[in-house]
Amino acid sequence: MRSASAGISSTLQTVPETSYASCGDLSLAYQVFGDGPVELVFVGPVISHVELCWTLPEFKAFFEQLATFSRVVLFDKAGVGLSDPVPKVRTLDHRAVEIEAVMDAVGFGKAVLFGIAVAIRRRTESTASCSARH
């Protein structure tokens, strides 16, 4: 874990370490933080960066609150932030596979999907329909 800048509350004393999940030929950047009983996957907006988001006080405060009651995984979708670039636009089915890959990397079975993206409903349906999670 890296030392955090001043201002991180007592909930998160450090900025979470960035790891990478394999998703086919791609690597997806993710971070895990919190130790609550709920497994929560945060599906971010169209544009994200798992390390730079911690520099925004609003995001930091929001994630600190989530960490009080859940184990959270935050990730950059393929083609965004620290994840590998992609040559073409990804479909919603691709995005669902990315969620599955990150869940597998951190050992989540069934998780709460929390999203602020417009397409989260479709992603949730795609992920929920995967037989490996039933």
Image (cartoon, rainbow, N blue to C red):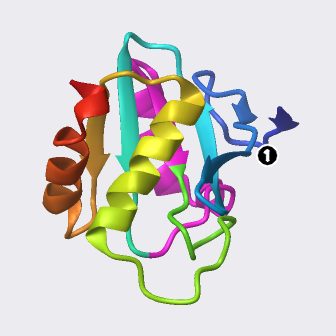
Residue where numbered disc 1 is placed: 5
Give the quarter of the figure containing the C terminus: top left
Picture coordinates of residue 52 (x, y %)?
66, 63
Q: Quadrant of the N terminus?
A: top right
**Residue drawn at (28%, 53%) of the image:** 115
Q: Is residue 31 visible?
A: yes
Residue 19 vs 25, above or below: the answer is above
The x, y position of residue 128, in whole percent, is: 19, 40
Q: Position of residue 47 (x, y in %)?
A: 48, 75
In magenta stretch: residue 62: yes
Q: Range of the magenta residues?
A: 47-74
Q: Amino acid at mark 1?
A: Ser
- 27 displayed left or right of 90: right
- Identify the residue at image location x=40%, y=21%: 70
Residue 28 in the image: above or below residue 127: below
| Frontmost residue, 9 versus 91 | 91
Residue 116 position by quadrant: bottom left
- Residue at position x 38%, y 23% in the image: 39
Q: Percent x, y for residue 113?
A: 28, 40
What residue occupies the far bottom of the structure in this picture? 88
Taking depth in this image into account, of 91 and 35 the one nearest to the observer is 91
> What residue is rendered at 41% in x and 48% in y?
99
